[in-house]
Amino acid sequence: MKENLQKKTFQKNPIKGAKFTIAISSAKGGVGKSTFATNLAIALEKIGCKVGLLDADIYGPSLPKLFSISGKPESDGQNLQPIIKYGIQCMSIGFLTDKETPMIWRGPMVTSAIKTFTQKVSWKELDFIIVDMPPGTGDTQLTFAQEINLDGVIIISTPQEIALEDVKRGIKMFDKLKVKIIGLVDNMCHFIGDDGKKYSIFGEGGVKRTAEEFQKEFLGEIPINLEVSKQGDLGVPLLESNPAHEISKIYLNFAEKIKSKYITK
């Protein structure tokens, strides 16, 4: 006797208070995803958008450090209130825990936290909410893709082959879950030495080739620049401290691309 098995269906819910939800993802850690997310959020704010930033990396939250936020969010008894910094509405598990306490949580607890941050935070009249996803293809990614109405995802990678192998798995995951991939970004693609020469220490062109292989848009590349990491460590992202910097202009260009895709004049 055959059993009548049905696939479980998920109800996708929008994040309350936001018109569009954009996830920033990387299949491998250490490729600059959180730095990209924070600077993109600031760039969108600087070109006139109302922006929220949700740090969904439960096991390794970066937002408290990158934005130099040490306070805890207030609550009205029902919802958490986002902390506003640099004109951005912010929320992170790092605001609620001690920075030296490891998050030893199983999948259901992670899923519960994600639902709290998406449905129990008073996000206010946002054009975009930027979601800094954890690296990989685990519970958090599945929860967002299956239960949250994501309007698109940007995949960040360095051009080295070991990172690109994971990127390909990430692309396949989002395609399978029917989440729109806005495009790929080649981060830390090269640096310019004191001699003026370009050095591509992680390889060259790999992210663009991967985008072409999977017929995704290649959004552009971001060179290595010491000011980016320096400002991140200070808790003042480069785009906030120096909007005229060459790297800041790259982020502003990314922001204009995103805005033009979703907001019509």
Image (cartoon, rainbow, N blue to C red):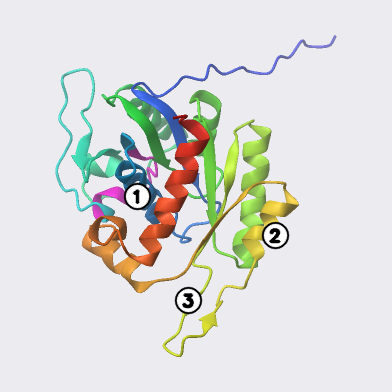
Q: In the rendered view of the protein, which quadrant contains the N terminus? A: top right
Q: Tag 1: residue type?
A: Thr
Going 67% across and 51% down the picture, which residue do you hit?
168
Rendered view: 239 above or below 3: below
Per the image, the residue denoted by label 3 is 191
Rendered view: 224 above or below 192: above
CA distance separating discs 1 and 2? 26 Å
N-term mark: 2 or 3: 3
Percent coordinates x, y for residue 10 in the rendering: 56, 18
Going 40% across and 24% down the picture, which residue do you hit?
15
* Element on which disc 1 rests: helix
Work out whether residue 264 or residue 181 is closer to the camera in this orientation and state it.
264
**Dot 1 alpha-carbon crowd within 10 angstroms: few under 14, some 14 to 19, many 20 or more:** many
User: Do the residues bearing badges 1 and 2 touch, measured as CB atoms within 8 Å?
Assistant: no
Q: Tag 2: residue type?
A: Arg
* Element on which disc 2 rests: helix
Per the image, the residue denoted by label 1 is 38
Mark yes or no: residue 100 visible. Answer: no
Per the image, the residue denoted by label 2 is 209
* Element on which disc 3 rests: strand
CA distance separating discs 2 and 3? 20 Å
Question: Looking at the image, which residue sits at the far front?
Answer: 265
Q: In the rendered view of the protein, which quadrant contains the C terminus? A: top left
Q: Tag 3: residue type?
A: Phe
Report the span colored magenta: 53-65
